[in-house]
Image (spheres, rainbow, N blue to C red):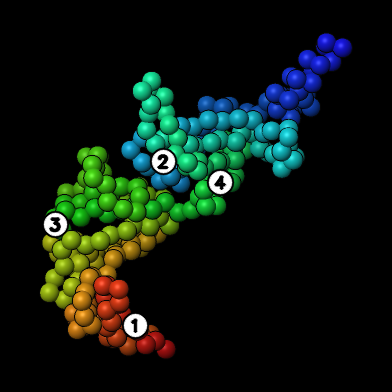
Amino acid sequence: MRFFALFIIVSFLLPARALAGETPPACQQDNAIAVVKSDYRFTYFCSSSHGCDFKARPPSPLNADERDDKNLAWVVTASVIGGYDSNGQPQFMPEGAAFALVSTECKIENTLGPNGPLHTAEYFLDDVGGKEFALYPGIAYRSNVDPKYSAKSLDALEQMVSQLPADARIHWIPAQRNSYKKPLLFGSEANLTEFWKFCFLHKVKLEIAPPSCKKESECTAFCKDAGKGTTCLTDGVAACERGSCTCSLTCK
């Protein structure tokens, strides 16, 4: 009777495949965690100053989806660290966790974050007067920037972009614009044109915040040549909405 009770307790602790007598997956626990840590989606998710704490567990026999997925080896949890207590133990952010389902081949099959699946990596282009830049994970300014994210030339910035995953997005709020309110990259509009092309070729989307405004007339120059005269009329119709310039194009 004692043996039977012990078997029941142990069976709850063992993964479903161990109970079935199957061979443990080739993808080991440390390998699964390493794969998730290096994935760009989790690099972005864990981009806060304290990073994430990573844990891996085998499929649970109490979860039907996990139990029936014969290709699932590990469920890896990335918990965002909000800080540390007086004993040096990590304190986790409320609802700040993401999960990765890792296959027996050590590949991420699916992800789940606080708001659904983790999507494209997003980066912020930090602009110091239009002459020096920093490109780091996230969608907002950082008060302290690691020197490894710094780029002091267009070539250095393009080298950093070349390492980004396809479909990544770069958010930029230009600090320097010309008299037409066009943004300047390293002090030049030509550099921006070159950077646009480079991002396009590497399948990276560059999203530039529109200039601020107080009235519609301040946006007229910004909307000039917005349509390039191809499928749309050359000039856009300027407007000042919620303190930012917008352009409406008439297209075929």
**Residue 248's disc number:** 1
- Please name the amino acid that badge 2 sits on: Cys
The earlier-in-sequence mark between 3 and 1 is 3
Work out which quarter of the rendered image holds the C terminus and state it.
bottom left
Above or below residue 182? Residue 38 is: above
Disc 4, disc 3: CB below 8 Å? no
Residue lying at 13% horizontally and 70% vertically, measured from the top left: 178
Q: Secondary structure at mark 3?
A: loop
- Please name the amino acid that badge 1 sits on: Ser
Q: Secondary structure at mark 2?
A: loop
Q: CA distance from mark 2 to mark 4?
A: 14 Å
Q: Nearer the viewer, residue 20 or 201?
A: 20
Q: CA distance from mark 4 to mark 3?
A: 38 Å
Side of 7 relative to 135 (left or right)? right
According to the image, label 2 marks what residue?
46
According to the image, label 3 marks what residue?
129
Q: Is residue 10 visible?
A: yes
Q: CA distance from mark 1 to mark 4?
A: 37 Å
The earlier-in-sequence mark between 3 and 2 is 2
Residue closest to the far front: 86
